[in-house]
Image (tube, rainbow, N blue to C red):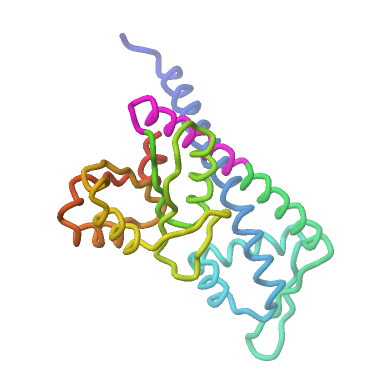
Amino acid sequence: MTFPTHIYYNLAQVHILNINQQIGRLKGILMPKHELNTLLEIKQNPSLTQRSLAHRLNISLGLTNAILQNLIHRGWIKAKRMTGRKILYLITPEGMANISRLMYNRFQETLHYYQYTKDLLTAYLMKLYQQGEKTINIYGTGQLAEITYYAGISTPLKINAIISDDPSKEKFLGQQAISIEDFLSQYSNYNNLSGQKITILSTDSPEKLTKEISKYKNIQKNIKIINIETILKNL
């Protein structure tokens, strides 16, 4: 079926509008993050060069320049030229007020992320329990490990151990943490556990964990590692 030319034109315009709206939403998500980080860096060190600022923010020099120009245009910062090519960036009272607003927004977003991730993991762990899993072990002591821990205690699953490769982390959320080496050694040496299947939820890079497990040939086949980051990407 052939449509008149003007209909194709209108459809194309609608498609372009949708793309522009999506780009606008993306900018709305990314820009406040970069704006806040830029303001915080400037607040700490007003004499930073654009190149140093870009390095600290881990973004391109062009994007850094665009953010600074945007902040100047909005009256959040002002640029004061010093000797030579040196520029001092000063945060205005309006800029200080917006730092507070953006920090509050980030706090709200973090809370939303935390709760949303916990709900996803709770549902996943419930499915594990329904499939016959009774006990889990958590590898890692970072933020994702914390979320995984609270998701775990929201289910009938028993958390057997918190495994850490950080010697300074003797306790985690009130629980005794155990090193990878000690955990595997204990599991390998107990005869009544050597044939038992165990599940480790990895909330950190699992390379070191996998490397250590490979040293224990007698229990290697009994250990199942679940990469939590991979699970979250696929949920």
Q: Looking at the picture, how far across and down is residue 194, in whole percent?
A: 22, 48
Question: From this viewpoint, which residue is outermost toward the top?
Answer: 1
Q: Nearer the viewer, residue 195 or 10?
A: 195
Decide whether residue 1 is among the magenta residues. Answer: no
Residue 5, by quadrant, is: top left
Q: Looking at the picture, how far across and down is residue 16, in whole percent?
A: 48, 33
Q: Nearer the viewer, residue 210 or 100?
A: 210
Residue at the image position 42 percent from the left and 60 percent from the top:
178
Q: Main secondary structure of the magenta part?
A: helix
Question: Vertical placement of 68 versus 15: above or below?
Answer: below
Placement of the N terminus among the 4 image quadrants: top left
Q: Nearer the viewer, residue 82 or 194?
A: 194
Question: From this viewpoint, which residue is outermost toward the left?
Answer: 217
Residue at the image position 52 percent from the left and 32 percent from the top:
17
Placement of the C terminus among the 4 image quadrants: top left
Relative side of 104 to 206, left or right? right
Which segment did they paint magenta? 112-133
